[in-house]
Image (spheres, grey):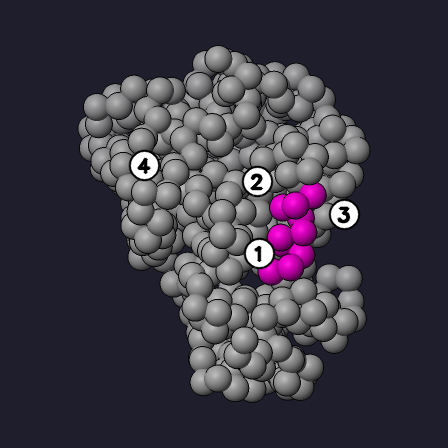
């Protein structure tokens, strides 16, 4: 066997994300000559307990959002810690990063600095072993292409003047392949543009590429999406179902859910009734953060009421953190978890969280952030986990489509071995039928 490649240099740079805000890009060089970069995304509707994204706070640069401190930490402490380590020992690399930071929240070096280094090492190790990233992370049996959830209508913190609900997603679970799923999604996205224009609504787009129409209610968005699915020639529920991410923390205030578009202020119990009605009416297959991230009691009640009919996903609630997921498992909150690398900050911890989810019978939905880069690692991560689900925004805008295009490439590479997850990704659907 050839000698294990060792980390020779790690450097970072401040680049821009899709919103025009600075983010961290890390380049790893190995003794073998392999050199590769990874860049870090950034959220807007962030969970309270996410790992800390280090920003400079210097108002004279990028309104305080610069990441020069994080860059300096990569070039300094992180490079000193990792230089000389074998690149194919991801767990040791990530343990070293966690130990060098020394805090629970990765606030010392910054989770953006740490994830950039962690992910760049994984990518370098994959190249070194001659494997694509999905196979390096997932092993020889990684062959399941995820169902893409296309966020075609944006609201909340991702679209001013849009609905209160942050994400309305097309879920093309009836497609035979990923390639066809992408076509279903893109055609319906364009049909929705026409349906909105006919209704006199705006077709401007939000942070994740979905339209941001001004509509009289949240339900009005659902009706237009169902119309668009039919207009594009698909059967709602059969070919394309709908998933939602209300990101409810963003409209939760003083113990109440304030749905401005509906002119309603609801208690936790009333909010659960509201979603229960939507699950019955709209063929929802996935419901993420339907309640605020500190409403654990509400989550338990909602999961009890709806968990056998719909996938209930914890995003802000779990922040890809084993500790919060374990609490969710113990208290029967949700039956699924959103997986975002930068919420926890290392590749290893992300894989560990997914492993805990699977062992408890929870599904995993791999996710981008609303502020993205051209890095496509999450596409590989979704195939590596074999979890059958990914969300990367609308089938439009370069930074969103880059991930879907990477999945096309993976599907092509797998050839006859590729299997599209389709309906099987959604356990509750199996139980329903
Ligand atoms: P964020 O949104 O990246 O702004 O947090 C994505 C989500 O809430 O799932
Ligand atoms: Zn979310």
Is residue 216 magenta-colored? no
Cβ at disc 1 under 8 Å from ligand 1: no
Q: Residues within 10 Å of mark 1 (few under 14, many from 20)?
A: many
Q: Is residue 386 visible?
A: yes
Q: Nearer the viewer, mark 4 or mark 3?
A: 4
Q: Which residue is mark 3?
A: 323
Residue interval drawn in magenta: 347-356
Give the mark nearer the N terminus: 3 vs 1: 3
Give the mark nearer the N terminus: 1 vs 2: 1
Element under disc 3: helix
In the picture, the disc for residue 403 is none
Is residue 353 magenta-colored? yes
Q: Nearer the viewer, mark 4 or mark 2?
A: 4
Q: Which residue is mark 4?
A: 177
Report how far apart the C-alphas of labels 1 and 4 lie in the structure. 26 Å
Q: Can you give x and y, in whole percent of width and height, for residue 352 in the image?
A: 67, 51
Q: Is residue 29 left or right of residue 172?
A: right
Element under disc 1: helix
Dominant SS type (magenta): helix
Q: Which residue is mark 2?
A: 364
């Amino acid at each position: 066997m050839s000698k294990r490649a060792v980390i020779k240099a790690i450097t970072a740079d401040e680049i821009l994300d899709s919103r025009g805000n600075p983010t961290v890009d890390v380049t790893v060089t190995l003794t073998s000559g392999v050199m590769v970069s990874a860049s870090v995304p950034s959220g807007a509707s962030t969970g309270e307990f996410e790992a800390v994204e280090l920003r400079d706070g210097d108002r004279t640069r990028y309104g305080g959002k610069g990441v020069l401190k994080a860059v300096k930490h990569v070039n300094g402490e992180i490079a000193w810690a990792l230089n000389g380590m074998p690149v194919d020992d991801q767990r040791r690399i990530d343990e070293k990063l966690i130990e060098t930071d020394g805090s629970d929240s990765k606030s010392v070096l910054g989770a953006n600095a740490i994830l950039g280094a962690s992910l760049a090492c994984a990518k370098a190790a994959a190249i070194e072993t001659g494997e694509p990233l999905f196979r390096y992370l997932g092993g020889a049996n990684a062959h399941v292409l995820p169902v893409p959830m296309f966020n075609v209508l944006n609201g909340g913190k991702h679209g001013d003047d849009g609905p209160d609900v942050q994400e309305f997603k097309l879920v093309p679970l009836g497609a035979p392949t990923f390639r066809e799923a992408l076509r279903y999604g893109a055609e319906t996205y364009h049909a929705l543009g026409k349906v909105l224009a006919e209704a006199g609504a705006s077709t401007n787009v939000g942070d994740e590429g979905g339209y941001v129409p001004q509509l009289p209610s949240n339900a009005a968005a659902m009706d237009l999406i169902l119309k668009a699915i039919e207009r594009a020639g698909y059967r709602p529920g059969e070919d394309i179902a709908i998933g939602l991410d209300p990101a409810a923390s963003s409209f939760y205030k003083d113990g109440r859910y304030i749905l401005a578009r509906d002119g309603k202020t609801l208690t936790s119990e009333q909010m659960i009734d509201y979603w229960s009605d939507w699950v019955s009416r709209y063929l929802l297959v996935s419901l993420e953060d339907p309640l605020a991230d500190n409403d654990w009691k509400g989550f338990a009640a909602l999961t009890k009421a709806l968990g056998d009919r719909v996938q209930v996903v914890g995003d802000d609630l779990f922040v890809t953190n084993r500790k919060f997921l374990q609490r969710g498992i113990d208290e029967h909150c949700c039956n699924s978890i959103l997986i975002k690398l930068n919420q926890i900050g290392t590749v290893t911890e992300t894989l560990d969280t997914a492993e805990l989810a699977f062992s408890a019978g929870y599904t995993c939905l791999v996710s981008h952030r609303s502020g993205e880069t051209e890095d496509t690692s999450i596409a590989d991560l979704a195939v590596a986990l074999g979890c059958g689900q990914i969300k990367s925004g609308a089938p439009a805008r370069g930074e969103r489509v880059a991930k879907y295009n990477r999945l096309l490439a993976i599907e092509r590479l797998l050839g006859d071995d590729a299997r599209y997850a389709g309906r099987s990704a959604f356990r509750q659907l199996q139980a329903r039928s």
